[in-house]
Every structure is written in structure tokens, then in C-alpha cells.
Amino acid sequence: MRAAFSSLSLLLFLFSTSCSHIPQPAPYAFSEQQKMQATHHWDILASDVANQINNQLITRDYIDSSVYIQSTCGSDSTPCDQNETTQFNEAFRDLLITRLVSFGVPTSAEKKKNDIEVLYKVQVVYHASTRYALAPGTLTALTTAISVFRNTSGIAQSLALAAGIDIAYATSPGHGHYEIIITTSMVTDEKYLFRTSDIYYINDPDFWQYQIRSTGKTLQLVDG
């Protein structure tokens, strides 16, 4: 038995030393990210963006200038074709116009030469891997639980750690594979007056509400 433990310890030592030349991946500190799940959430975003646009127009002394809302695909200079529209694109434009009008911002129904352009685009991001989020306090709880094994053998500690991690992942929520990046810009004379990007989780079955229909453009992130 002692020989078996010695052999296993030697293998663990050789494995650890052979892998010690590369940095170990470290997670980001715990943070929160909102999830788009209803048209009401689209309206909340439209209200927030309209408020920021209104404030920028006032701050930069464009209070009497009119704006024109345009969805773009691929780049800020490329308006979406009619067959590239999505449910989100159509709804967000309507909601944003409604909110701008309610703020008293002059908003053009048709583009005029001197209009300030408000451009927005949506990028769908696909993650191939299954991702989990540990709730705050989970790692602390695991550390406390495993610390009782500090006086046991290294093998027992390793088994306890593995079991604790398995429990943590089993009880942690798994996030879907899709996220979206919504970028809104305000441009005049080929210069940015304002730009903001918002990132959200979305439910996997809802990705088609944001993805361009004609090309199916999706940014896919793959581990490794």
C-alpha cells in the first residue's frame, strides 16, 4: 500500500512539474451582466440611450439640431438592407425614436443633409463552450469545507477538492451560448460625438431576433 501511494505521489509530482512552465488560467472577479428577455428590456435600453443622446446634444451645443436614426450592419457606414432587418432592429429603432421625441429631441422621419446620424448595430456572439457562474460565497464556502482536510494526506485533499468543485459546478447556473453587443453612435461631419456599447446575455432560442437574416453573421468564440 505504501509503495502504491509513493508511486502515485511521484506521478503527481512529475505531472505538476511538467506543467509548471505555463501560466494557469485565472477567472475574473465576480461581476454581473444583465440578460435581455423581453421587449420591455429593449425599451429600457432605448430610454437609456435616448437620455445619453439628449445629454450629449445639450452638452455639445447641438440642442436645436435634428437627428436621424439608422440601423447599420457590419460597420457604422453600412446601412442595413431591407432583407437584413431583424426583430430587434425594427423594434429598437421605433422605441428609440419614441424616447427621443419624448425628450424633445428633433427627430427626422427622413434623412436630411444636416442631420446628426444616430447609428446602431447588433453583433451576435456565440460561445461554443458551456459556461458556469459560481455564486458569490461559493468559493469561500468550498475553502472552509476543504480546510478541515488540511491535516490529511495530499491524496485525500485532492479528492476532497475535486468533489467540492464537482458540487460547485453541479449547483451553479449554466449560462447559454449567446451574447449580444449593441453599439450606438452619434456621428456628424464624419466624427463621433457619442458612442456606447452594451453587452447582454440572451436566451439561446431567441438569438434569431438579433441575427441578420440574409447572411447569418455570428461571431463564434471557441475554446483553445
Image (tube, rainbow, N blue to C red):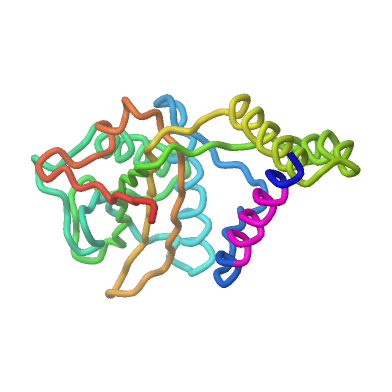
Q: Nearer the viewer, residue 221 or 187?
A: 221
Image quadrant where residue 158 sits: top right
- Identified at 46% across, 47% down, the residue is 199
Q: Magenta segment, principal secondary structure?
A: helix
- Relative to residue 55, is residue 193 depicted above or below? below
- Identified at 32% across, 27% down, the residue is 206
* In the displayed structure image, the side of residue 1 where residue 85 appears, left or right: left
10 drawn magenta: yes
11 drawn magenta: yes
- Relative to residue 220, is residue 22 depicted above or below? below
Can you give x and y, in whole percent of width and height, for residue 16 in the image? Answer: 62, 60
Q: Nearer the viewer, residue 54 or 198?
A: 198
- The N terminus is located in which quarter? top right
Can you give x and y, in whole percent of width and height, for residue 96 in the image? Answer: 37, 41
- Identified at 46% across, 61% down, the residue is 57
- Identified at 48% across, 39% down, the residue is 131
- Relative to residue 131, is residue 76 depicted above or below? below
Can you give x and y, in whole percent of width and height, for residue 145 in the image? Answer: 83, 33
* In the displayed structure image, the side of residue 75 where residue 178 appears, left or right: right
Numbered label tally: 0
Can you give x and y, in whole percent of width and height, for residue 192 in the image? Answer: 37, 70
Image quadrant where residue 150 sits: top right
Q: Nearer the viewer, residue 34 or 134?
A: 134
State the extent of the magenta-drawn residues as a range: 6-17
* In the displayed structure image, the side of residue 111 where residue 152 appears, left or right: right
- Relative to residue 123, is residue 65 depicted above or below? below
